[in-house]
Image: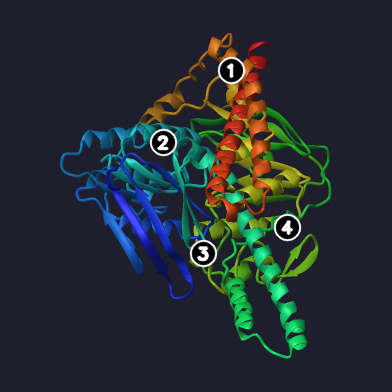
Amino acid sequence: MAPPLLALQDIRLSFGGPSLIENAALTVSAGERLCLVGRNGSGKSTLLKIAAGLVEADSGTRFLQPGTTVRYLAQEPDLSAFATTRTYVEAGLGPGDDPHRATRLLESLGLTGEETPKSLSGGETRRAALAEALAPEPDVLLLDEPTNHLDLPAIEWLEETLRSMRSAIVLISHDRRFLERLSRTTVWLDRGKTRRLDQGFSAFEGWRDAILNEEEKERERLDRKISQEIDWVRYGVTARRKRNMGRLRKLEGLRTERREQRRAVGEVKFGAAVGDLSGKLVVEAFGVSKAYDERVIVRDFSTRILRGDRIALVGANGAGKTTLLGLLTGAIKPDEGRVKLGTNLEMVTLDQRRESLDPTTTLSAALTEGRGDSVIVNGEARHVIGYMRDFLFTPEQARAPISALSGGERGRLMLARALAKTSNLLVLDEPTNDLDLETLDLLEEMLDDYAGTILLVSHDRDFLDRVATSVIVAEGDGTWTDYAGGYTDMIAQRGEAAPARLIAKSERKDEAKAPAAPRAAQKVKLSFKQKHALETLPKRIATLETEIATLGAVLQDGNLFARDRKRFDTATARMSAAQAERDAAEEEWLTLEMLRETLEG
């Protein structure tokens, strides 16, 4: 077996307190596609920096195969030392690298190469950094949240580009769909240690849950053992009038083991403060249009939003999603048409830029708005420390300035502020930015339970599928179309996804003046392959359900882990794979069924 290109062994790192990373490992072989997952603050980005050679561990070894090229994409790239995006990307090329590839990547990512760093938005900075990392086609590509600030066409373009590259890739991302499509191996960083699963992200969550469940059972067994030993100490010693010091030492050892066990990090406790019911009609738009100079953002758009709807706005960066959101909420006045807002609306907005957060303000002051040490939630006062704990903040962070928080922590803070206010209309502009996967799960559950109406902008396809009841899509030239269902449902109804290739700004300006190109014609009938899949998938799903039930019965044996670890691991891995196969089959069947219904009129 060929040695790995990059390997980390027994990595340990702390920043003066408890170890952030202890006994962690990471091996990357040629052509491998690996995702690194874990909670916000678990040390994923730090471990990736150690792999990139940018941070030195307290102990452990880093091995890099001689001659191996490595490129690292940071969460917050710094282009300030370069005159233009082109000079920045070309500076990353090595001897023998193709300079024309740098130009092609910039153009594909919608940049001309002449932009100055000071003029770039967050999304444009991320695109330039991607071009810099991808241009040399390195042996190992380390990507930290590569989809942050990218729109859907850019994300889909990036997926296809990474698939076609020969590089070994290590990914950190909160985008489930992105991880599922690209990863073949998963490394879980949890409580400072790494665990490796030789399957892609689609199998991860079932595997993780099985491990956590087994840990909980082990803790319960240990608790019972401690209880038994305490009973013996209380009654057995008195009855015998003699202390068995060995058994007392065993009890103390059990207590120490229990005390030192590192539990999984607690869960965020989400719950929106819901106000009085709004009227049945929330928003109604009649022939709304909006333009800036000669550029039409919205053209003759009409829609009706009712109480309880979850409406998502989808489109490329610059398409006008935030503008349309402002029109629908009354924050922006249309040039033509009118917007009618319903009665008794209590609106709370979460903005994507975190602009309402003063970096010098402390975390507690941001939650209490500087008024004492209480937060008003659902009309009741709660101590700020208790409310902070609901969102995984420690008491020590109460007096820390917001500038000291990570991107994920700032995202949780914005959610904590927004959800404390009573509302019956939530307006969420990129709410998933920087949130970890577990927090995303809980946010989705909270939104599912929310009794009001939701308007949201997001580029997270999995999040859209789980939350949205309707998707409004930018079709180009100011045209917006409303589709029922989530993102996958929208694709089935359109017969095509959003374009995966981007166009340079100079081309966009020309296209803005020209009439919109007609959309590709939809298929008039299902292909033979699609018909066959539609007919056979239900049987495949039923077979997988039976297999999952059988494996579940095997794993119900609480002693299996201790008695036959190999069988436990095999059954756990197969159950995760079977669940992923079933979910994929169900999604494929649903997509094909909706496409069939659409084509049949």
- Which quadrant holds the N terminus? top left
Question: From where the camera sits, is residue 382 visible?
Answer: yes
Q: Which residue is mark 3?
A: 405
Residue lying at the far left of the rendered structure: 95
Q: How has the structure been colored for display?
A: rainbow
Sequence-first tag of 4 and 2:
2
Q: Which residue is mark 1?
A: 533
Sequence-first tag of 4 and 1:
4
Q: CA distance from mark 2 to mark 3?
A: 29 Å
Instruction: Judge depth for marks 4 and 2 and give the one in front.
Output: 2
Assign a secondary structure to mark 1. Answer: helix
Residues under numbered marks 1 and 3 in contact, where contact means CB atoms less than 8 Å apart: no
Amino acid at pointer 4? Lys
Instruction: Judge depth for marks 4 and 3 and give the one in front.
Output: 3
Q: Dot 3: few (<14), some (14–19), or many (≥20) neighbours within 10 Å?
A: some
- Image height check: is 39 above or below 256? above
Q: Nearer the viewer, residue 557 or 595?
A: 557
Q: Which residue is mark 2?
A: 158
Q: Which quarter of the figure has residue 78?
A: bottom left
Task: Kindly identify which numbered label has been placed on residue 189.
Answer: none
Amino acid at pointer 2? Leu
**Residue drawn at 54 percent across, 41 percent down:** 203
Q: Nearer the viewer, residue 33 or 269?
A: 33
On screen, residue 249 versus residue 5, left or right, reads right
Q: CA distance from mark 4 to mark 1?
A: 48 Å
